[in-house]
Image: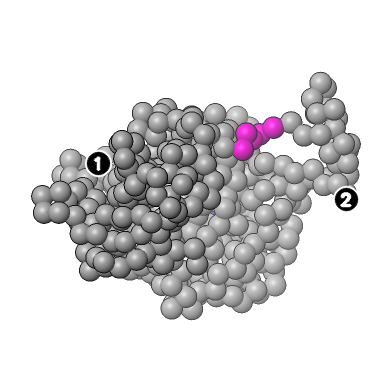
Amino acid sequence: MLRTHKISEVEKKLAGKKVKLVGWVDSLRDLKSMVFIVLRDRYGKVQCILPKNSKGLEDVEKLTLESCISIEGEVKERPKGQENKAMGKQGEVEIKASKLDIFSSAKKLPLDPKTAGEDIRLKYRYLDIRMNEPLRKNLEMRHKIIQYIRDYLNEEDFLEIQTPLLTKSSPEGCRDFIVPSRIHKGLFYALPQSPQQYKQLLMVAGIDRYFQIAPCMRDEDARAHRSPGEFYQLDLEMSFVHQEDILNIIEDMFVKMIKKLLPDKKLTFEKFPRLSYDEVMKKYKTDKPDLRKNKKDPNELAFAWIIDFPLFEEELSKEGNYAPMHHMFTMPKEEDLKYLNKKDAHKAKSYQHDLVLNGFEVGGGSIRIHNPEVQSKIFELIGFNDKQREYFAHMLEAFELGPPPHGGIAPGIDRLIMVLLGEPSLREVMAFPKNKEAKDLTLGAPDIVFKDQLDEVGLKFKDKGKK
Ligand code: ASP
């Protein structure tokens, strides 16, 4: 290792000891006979004193802000009264350097992270993450939350299974991102909007508890609190369950996770209320009510389940067809199967469940249909023609090969963490988010591609494509 300690480990009890630290120059003061720097790594910051004209410190005058360096030196306790409280335990010590190595120098910085606008922060995201501790802390908490979820579900016999990223475009939901196939010219893959069909097929496959931290890609414009293009879901599916079983496991996992990882947060309800769609629409005029008792308290978290949704949206399409409220695999309530006809379908309720938190929808799911006749009926009410039906032939066929009763949910990871951490934007909990115009400013995507690449997949664009 190029270091003996992380900076967060350097404290009074090491006084008199030699340490070797690595990191970046956070600040720099050049006095006549010495240079003071604050050295920063992922874990903390500490002040270092580098006397000029000393053996081992020949490069001291070449130091610039954000250069990546290593410093060897002795830990000294700071004289009484000269501690830096803001630096915690590291504020009680400083390093008297005896050796400096510059791994790499940084040129003049292109941004001041304290004042920089968002696009420039996104362009230099690696500097933003390096220099901006709250952002780094958010990424750390995101890691811990995902780790907690994995451990919890593993204990509960869930299998984490990766499903394809190159899949099939389908005529439902949102707009797909499509990917031209080189091997099969003229044909296209689509990036998954969610692993919905695969996770249901995994249930047919007998994997009775599945989850995945799944990337979901949807070609939608940016909306408030929805990242354009892509986001992550905790995608989960279970066989042989009632709706209550799904709600209980998610609720137990989140309550325990919050108590362990976010102990300052206060849960308004330890048992999340189950509220019917009709009830909340009447009372709050929204299906994502904010149920906090004190909306000014940044630490209050009010979760609730919304259930008993209508199976279909109220408005019919121009062609007079129904649109599913959740998605077309959602099971109608048994007592409402009688309404599955053109005239009455709006009366049918379903086994959809949404999880809301402080006025945000942070997850949705349902018990699924596992009966091919009911599924066929839904396709008919949605107005699928034969071609559209063809798209789902594999699902209908699987439903004729012994599907178990099943259901699931998919909490949105980014949005959940944003609300849990009280951040105003999804971008504060993602490492490399797209900007509001759906651009990746760090790498500069989307971009044109070489003409050869277009030729290979058999595509032609007017005036586009690099020569
Ligand atoms: N796939 C659904 C969604 O993305 C969630 C679910 O039904 O499990 O909203």
Instruction: Indicate the quadrant containing the C terminus: top left, top right, bottom left or bottom right.
Output: top right
Give whichever of 296, 32 is nearer the camera: 32
Which tag, 1 or 2, sits closer to the chain's start?
2
Quadrant for residue 448, please give it: top right
| Residue 253 within the segment the image draws in magenta | no
Label drawn at residue 283: 1
What residue is drawn where x is 30% and y is 68%? 17
User: Looking at the picture, how far across and down is residue 335, in whole percent?
Assistant: 45, 60
What residue is drawn where x is 71% and y is 53%? 167
User: Please, what is the three-letter code of the amino acid marked with disc 2?
Assistant: Ile
Mark 2 Cα shell of 10 Å, populated few (<14), some (14-19), many (≥20): few
Q: Viewed as shown, does residue 318 lie left or right of 227?
A: right
* Residue that sits furthest to the top in the current view: 463
How are the colours assigned in the image?
A: one colour
Give whichever of 359, 354 is nearer the camera: 359
Q: Viewed as shown, does residue 401 lie left or right of 254?
A: right
Give whichever of 41, 262 is nearer the camera: 41
Label drawn at residue 183: 2
- C-alpha span from label 1 to label 2: 56 Å
User: Looking at the picture, how far across and down is residue 458, in whole percent?
Assistant: 88, 38
Task: Work out whether residue 354 can be spotted.
Answer: no
What residue is drawn where x is 40% and y is 59%? 72
Q: Say what secondary structure mark 2 lies in.
A: loop
